[in-house]
């Protein structure tokens, strides 16, 4: 049975984002040049990272899992929509975003395909929506007229918030009265503790460092609503895939194996590796957040994409009259053909080099 999803405000936010990004992709797609090559013949793959953190494909590179690509950092990003915009304007070659935004983008005409799950919620890592321990907010209805800090509009944090409010029985008009305030993830805890917002979305190391300091508790979490689930995907342009299929295949196999490495490797070894990677990449950052890393956040071995993770958004668009029934099929929006954990090269529960191994 399709899940009920939020309506008007999310629709407006996603529609605006999709219209902008689709226009950008149409303007820039025809003018894309062939990727650069290194002296030894590897293809340069441009990407955006995150300060003080190591993403999955940076780890794959450090582990030596790539043979055909060389990563080139183009700066940092703080949200999926910004990352996709960079990909749409040919500032980077690969982007990652919340699956709802990806589906909306494709529905708007953008030619991109999801190739690998990029983030999600597992038992250790998920996004919580926190209030102070002295807060009078205890229910969804208490949020009417209050402020919720999210990292960006039209993406994961807004979707989870709207869905929870809907499930708790608020009407569309009441949900519209809950104010969503954009706050960078690194500043959310401070804004919450100072009373600048009433609820703050905290995930990954930002959640764990905040909880260690105490005084906060969750009002709702994405894991409580959907369980363990993959929420986002890495995407490439269809033209890029068609013209550089070996590059995409190398990216996916290496990144999938790195994610599997995270899923089966003791936590202290992961943290030690992250510290080394951050230390040698020379970006004038520190590794203070690394000790709070708990898990990959992806519950599926090797980050294989599941159809249901995209289908819920197709159903939502159809219900809201934004997409004709049957126009999009979830199976057409993603591919697992490059993923060794899906294409038969490795058994689904295998380790990062194909060996039999038990998960942590």
Image: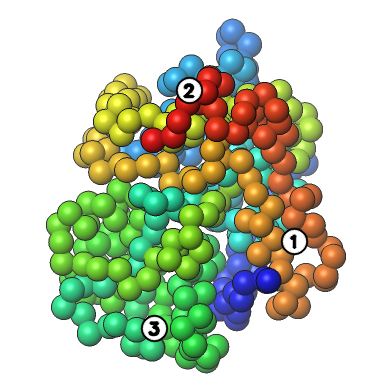
In this rendering, the label closer to the viewer, 3 or 1 = 3
Image point 67% across, 24% down: which residue?
Answer: 345
Determine whether, in the image, residue 310 is placed left or right of residue 76. Answer: right
Residue 122, x across and y down, in percent: 43, 50
Q: Nearer the viewer, mark 2 or mark 3?
A: 3
Residue marked by disc 3: 140
* First in sequence: mark 2 vs mark 1: 2
Question: CB atoms at circles 3 and 1 under 8 Å apart?
Answer: no
Q: Is residue 149 visible?
A: no
Q: Are marks 2 and 3 in contact (CB under 8 Å)?
A: no
Q: Residue at x 66, y 57 (%)?
A: 308
User: Mark 2 highlights which residue?
Assistant: 61
Closest to the observer, 50 or 63 = 63
Residue placed farthest to the top in the image? 40
Res 216 seen here: yes
Q: Is residue 107 above or below residue 304?
A: below
**Marked residue nearer the N-terminal end (3 or 1):** 1
Q: Secondary structure at mark 3?
A: loop
| Occupied quadrant, residue 213 | bottom left
The answer to whether 316 appears left or right of 74 in the picture is: right
Q: Is residue 139 above or below residue 43?
A: below
For residue 100, above or below residue 122 = below
- Which quadrant of the figure contains the N terminus? bottom right
Distance from disc 3 to disc 1, alpha carbons, whole Å, reads: 31 Å
Mark 1 residue element: helix
Residue at 42% in and 41% down: 296
* Sequence-earlier tag: 2 or 3: 2
Q: Position of residue 201 (x, y in %)?
A: 36, 64
Give the quadrant of the C terminus.
top left
Read off the residue under disc 1. Answer: 107
Q: How is the image coloured?
A: rainbow
What is the crowding at mark 2: few (fewer than 14 residues within 10 Å), some, or many (at least 20)? some
């Amino acid at each position: 049975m399709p899940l009920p999803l939020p309506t008007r405000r999310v629709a407006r936010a996603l529609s605006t984002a999709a219209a902008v990004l689709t226009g950008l992709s149409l303007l820039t797609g025809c003018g894309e040049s062939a990727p650069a090559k290194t002296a030894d013949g590897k293809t340069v793959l441009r990407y955006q990272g995150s300060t003080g953190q190591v993403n999955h494909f940076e780890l794959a590179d450090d582990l030596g899992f790539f043979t055909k690509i060389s990563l080139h950092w183009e700066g940092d990003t703080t949200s999926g929509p910004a990352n996709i915009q960079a990909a749409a304007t040919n500032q980077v070659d690969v982007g990652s975003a919340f699956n709802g935004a990806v589906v909306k983008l494709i529905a708007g005409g953008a030619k991109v395909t999801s190739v690998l799950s990029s983030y999600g919620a597992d038992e250790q890592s998920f996004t919580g929506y926190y209030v102070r321990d002295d807060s009078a907010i205890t229910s969804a209805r208490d949020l009417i007229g209050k402020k919720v800090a999210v990292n960006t509009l039209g993406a994961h944090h807004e979707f989870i918030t709207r869905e929870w409010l809907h499930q708790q029985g608020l009407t569309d008009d009441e949900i519209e009265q809950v104010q969503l305030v954009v706050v960078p993830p690194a500043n959310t805890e401070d804004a919450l503790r100072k009373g600048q917002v009433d609820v703050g979305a905290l995930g990954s190391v930002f959640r764990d460092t905040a909880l260690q300091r105490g005084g906060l508790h969750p009002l709702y979490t994405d894991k409580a609503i959907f369980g363990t689930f993959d929420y986002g995907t890495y995407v490439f342009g269809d033209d890029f895939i068609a013209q550089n299929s070996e590059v995409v295949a190398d990216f996916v196999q290496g990144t999938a194996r790195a994610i599997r490495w995270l899923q089966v490797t003791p936590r202290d070894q992961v943290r030690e590796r992250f510290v080394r990677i951050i230390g040698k990449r020379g970006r004038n950052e520190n590794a203070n957040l690394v000790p709070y890393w708990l898990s990959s956040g992806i519950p599926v071995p090797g980050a294989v994409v599941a159809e249901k993770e995209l289908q819920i958004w197709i159903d939502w668009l159809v219900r809201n009259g934004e997409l004709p029934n049957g126009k999009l099929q979830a199976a057409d929006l993603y591919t697992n053909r490059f993923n060794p954990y899906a294409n038969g090269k490795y058994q689904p529960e295998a380790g990062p080099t194909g060996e039999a191994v038990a998960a942590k």
